[in-house]
Every structure is written in C-alpha cells, then in structure tokens.
Amino acid sequence: MLLTLLALVIVLGVLISVHEFGHFIVAKLVGIQVLRFSLGFGRPVIEWRRGETEYWISWIPLGGYVKMAGLEDEGMVGELEGGKASAPIDPARAFDQKPLPARMAVILAGVTMNLVLAFVIYTGLVAIAGAPRAAVTPVDSVQTARLPQEAAPLAALHRGDRITHVNGDSLKTWDDLEEKILEGPEQLSFRVAGRSEPIVVHLPQDSAVRTQVARSIVQLFPARIGPVNLGQPAHRAGLKGGDVVVRIGLDTIESWTDMTRRIRASPGKPLHLTVQRGDSLVHLTVTPDEVDSGGQKFGLIGAYANPPVVRMHVPVVAALVIGVRLTGAQIVAVVTSVKRFVTGQASAKELGGPIAIAQMSGQALRLGIDWFLQFIAFFSVSLAVLNLLPIPVLDGGHAMFLIAEAIRRRPLSPQLRLRLTQVGMLIVLAIMVIALSNDVIRNVR
C-alpha cells in the first residue's frame, strides 16, 4: 500500500507539475500576469508568495491550475480554484489583452510539455540504458504444424536447446535470430549448443514463408508476470508484477508457454497457482474468463508476460528517432482509445479513476524503474491527449474558445465563457464519478 501511494504521488506530482509549468512559463514569457500556480485544487496545504504570484500545494490532488489575470473567475470557478488571488490585477497584462497566437501558445503549452516529457523519458531510457531487446533464451518448442516443408529440419529442435549461431554469426538477442531468418540468405545454418552438426535449411526469399518459420520457434522463459489488467481474473486473484508461477495444481510450470496453455484450456475453471514472490511461495486461485472466438472457447486471466530482456547500445541519433516513434505510437494508441469510447465501441465501465491510476503506478514501480518511467511517459501522453478534448474547463475547451474568437473576429463574452466552463466542469465531474465508481466496483468484486 505504501509503495502504491508513493508511486501515485510521484506520477501525479511529476505530470501535474510539468503540465502546469508549461502554462506558467509561456504565460510569463508573453507578459500575462500570473496570479497563482497551484498543484491540486481547493484551499492550500502549503503556500508561499514570490513577487506577484502565489504558489500553492492544495489538498485535492487531482490536477492543478495556473490562475491568470483575466481568467481569475473562470476555469474551475470559485472555491475549487481556491478563490480570488490577493495580488492586484493589472488590466493591461490580462489574458484577453494579448494577441490570439500568444494566448493559444499559453493554452497549448501544458499538453506540449507533457508530450516533451514523454519524448525525453523514452529517448533518455534508450540513450542511457540502451534499447530493450528480447534476450537469447533456450527453445521452448517448435510448432511443427505451422512449420513450412522447407524448414522441416528445425523440427529436430527440442525444449532446452539453445541456438548460438546462425551462418557463423553469434546471437546477442532473440531479435537477431528472427532477423537472420527473415533477411538471411537461402541457406541458413543453425548452430545448437551441445550438438556437433548444425541444422541446415534452405528457405526461398519469400517473406510469408520466412515469417512462418520465425514464429514457429517458441522462446522458453519463466512464467513471470508483468502488468495485470485491473478487474481481470489475474488482478482479482492477487497476482502481482514480478510473480513467477511455478505450479498449477500439482503440475510444475517451467515456462510462460506452459502456463498459458493451461489457462487457455481452462475457461471458467478455478486453477490453483503456486507463485514465487520474492523469497516466499504464495498460493492463489484464479478462474480464467471464458472467451469465445469463432465458436472456440478458451480462458484468459488478463496478465502480460515479463520476459528477460537485454539492453543494446544505440547511437544518440537513433535514440532520438526511437523516442519520437514511441511517443507517436502512444499518441495514436490513446487517440484510438478515446475514439472507441466516443463511438460506443468501448464501455464506460472500462474507465479508470484515481484508484486505478494508483494501482497501475504501484505495479509499474514494483516491476522496476524502467517500467515505472515508461508508465510515466505513457500517462503523460494520455494526459496531453485527454486535455485536448473540446470540453470547456480542459485545455481543448479553451482552445475552442480561441478558435471561435478567430472565426467571429471577436471573443466570446465572459458570461458565455463562464456558463460553458460550468457545463464543462459538470461533464468532467460526471466522468470522474463514473471512473471512481468503476474503481470501487473493481476492488469489491
């Protein structure tokens, strides 16, 4: 519990600070009077003043705000933003007195900083620690049914065999093995530890055939649990990131494949798991959900693999490219998720609130600092995208006000903005109530 709370404080503290600092610094740069910088809503727990700006850490830790001259009675309105600031307002430095591009820059600065933070985390992890790659492990099995005829000799591989070289080149990662199968010459020679003769196959330069071969060779790695989906069987049973499943019933589990095979074959049936957690053995019972796919039923528990990885050094330029690619991929993923909710493809029951954020933060921290940093990056992108929704009270709503002003060639009246902001606040509060209700329901099932 303490680890979960610590993780939540770090995640929210970092992301809210970065977001609001974006608004704050750009407002200062364009000459807008900043009355208050607050982490959290409501009345302050800690406060100090420097120059004309009040700095607060407030008691409702679900966001933050920058109170600017000209917007001091808008935003969350009234007591939710702690009331009026004590500094006298300079009308010439009010938000509405600045050119529209300057105001738009202030509004978009928060989400921009969140995206920059994600990019910095992704790039920094790769540049400092290296790019993660699947480690070379022994072979778990070969799916002979999907093995093309040209690669039939690979059926001689057995569980525990370790492929060390392909065509004389040593393998540093499992990705190397797949790359050599996909892109190598027609003749491929696989050197296996402990065998005097290599396994030689002849593959056509056909990407479909080679992909099939690469996917037929299954890695062997422990049934170590990674992230678990909140509210799913693994979470309800008490499985945690880093747990290693060593037995199901009386059967020893030697690999992730062993575990998933048993789970898929047991939809709706309780499974008794023996789990290694640190130095202790823990006994849990999980009942896989029954999933129907094309008339075939199988079990799922909502847990992801946590396979061994190695980190490979990459040049700085490559790290920057990877950072851009990962940030972009997360933007697409979050936008797709929002689209699913808006179009009704996803249920409101999937929404998560502060309890869910705390639980995800805690499990990411348990999995290790790299998992935790990547979670912060992911959540930072999520915060950026969600803040751009065209709901008054969010940055996207303020941006819509400015777009309307550009089209009409005059700003919306303060009274209309205030009413729309109050409506937006009700919408956001309603979403938060639904998300919090979902959190409670998930944890009392």
Image (tube, helix red, strand yellow):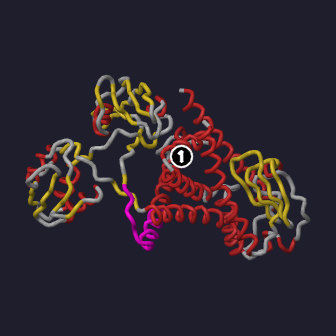
Q: How many neighbours does mark 1 have within 10 angstroms: few (below 14), some (14-19), or many (20 or more)?
A: many
Across the whole image, how many numbered discs are drawn on residues?
A: 1
Depth check: give the residue in front, 238 or 421. Answer: 238
Depth check: give the residue in front, 346 or 138. Answer: 138
Q: Is residue 190 left or right of residue 271?
A: left
Residue at the spot x=60%, y=66% of the render? 112
Asked if residue 182 is positioned above or below residue 144 in the image, the reply reads: below
| Quadrant of residue 414 within the rendered picture | bottom right
Residue at the spot x=42%, y=28% of the render? 281
Q: Main secondary structure of the magenta part?
A: helix
Circle 1 — which element? Answer: helix
Task: Write down the residue under mark 1.
Answer: 365
Asked if residue 85 is positioned above or below residue 348 in the image, the reply reads: below
Which span of residues is magenta-colored?
310-326
- Residue 373 spot, x, y in % from top left: 53, 54
Q: Is residue 41 left or right of residue 172?
A: right
Q: Is residue 35 left or right of residue 64?
A: right
Q: Quadrant of the N terminus?
A: top right
| Residue 245 lies in the magenta stretch | no
- Residue 203 spot, x, y in % from top left: 11, 60
| Residue 314 lies in the magenta stretch | yes
- Residue 359 spot, x, y in % from top left: 56, 40
- Residue 258 spot, x, y in % from top left: 28, 35
Q: Is residue 445 left or right of residue 325?
A: right
Q: The disc labelled 1 sits on which kind of residue? A: Leu
Residue at the spot x=72%, y=54% of the render? 64
